[in-house]
């Protein structure tokens, strides 16, 4: 079994963590849109200009995927975790456009031990993504299950 760096005990309540940044490109938005969310405002720049968005925008699912990538790169890949049973309060509050640079943030808002499995802990998180203009583009509240150190 691969040795992990982070366990339930390592996560602190109400400590805002910067997950890093990611820049969205037009090409990537179109490729993702064509594959997973082929609505015209994600895949066709000309039609998107005539929409209420006034231009191409990334799929919300693309934005979620980028936030997940940032979380994995920062520490999830080095965390002894069982993953997540779900996400609450997912909101796409502002469109993400080509050239936008999104910074991700993670905050543990609830931390408890598992009642049924003493080797596990549960974290409730507040995740957000903010663009280069300090406008929040995405928020969500996932729960993750993390092994304890023993």
Image (cartoon, rainbow, N blue to C red):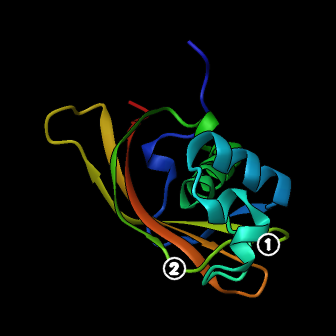
In the image, taking residue 144 as reference, residue 21 lies left or right, namely right
* Quadrant in the picture for residue 149: top left
Q: Residue 18, how many percent across, how many down?
A: 68, 66
Q: Is residue 9 above or below residue 20?
A: above
Residue in the foreground of this view, choosing between 65 and 147:
65
Badge 1: residue crowd in 10 Å (few <14, some 14–19, many ≥20): some
In the image, taking residue 34 as reference, residue 99 lies left or right, namely right
Badge 2: residue crowd in 10 Å (few <14, some 14–19, many ≥20): few
Quarter of the picture holding the C terminus = top left
At 44% from the left and 47% from the top, the residue drawn is 9
At 57% from the left and 57% from the top, the residue drawn is 39
Q: Residue 19, how many percent across, how many down?
A: 68, 60
At 26% from the left and 47% from the top, the residue drawn is 113
At 30% from the left and 31% from the top, the residue drawn is 119
Measure the alpha-carbon separation of dots 1 and 2.
14 Å
**Is residue 5 visible in the rendered structure shown here?**
no
Q: Residue 84, how many percent across, how many down?
A: 38, 42
Residue in the foreground of this view, choosing between 17 and 140:
140
Determine whether the residue tagged by mark 2 lies in a helix, strand or loop.
Answer: loop
Provide the residue designation for mark 1: 100
Provide the residue designation for mark 2: 93
């Amino acid at each position: 079994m691969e040795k992990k760096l982070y366990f339930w005990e390592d996560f602190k309540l109400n400590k805002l963590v910067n997950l890093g940044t990611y820049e969205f490109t037009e090409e990537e938005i179109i490729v993702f849109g064509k594959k997973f969310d082929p609505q015209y405002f994600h895949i066709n720049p000309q039609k998107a200009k005539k929409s209420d968005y006034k231009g191409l925008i990334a799929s919300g699912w693309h934005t979620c995927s980028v936030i997940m990538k940032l979380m994995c790169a920062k520490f999830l890949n080095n965390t002894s975790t069982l993953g997540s049973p779900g996400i609450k309060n997912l909101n796409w509050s502002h469109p993400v456009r080509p050239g936008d640079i999104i910074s991700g943030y993670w905050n543990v808002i609830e931390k408890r031990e598992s009642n049924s499995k003493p080797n596990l802990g549960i974290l409730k998180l507040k995740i957000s993504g903010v663009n280069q203009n300090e406008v929040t583009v995405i928020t969500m509240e996932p729960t993750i299950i993390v092994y304890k150190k023993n």
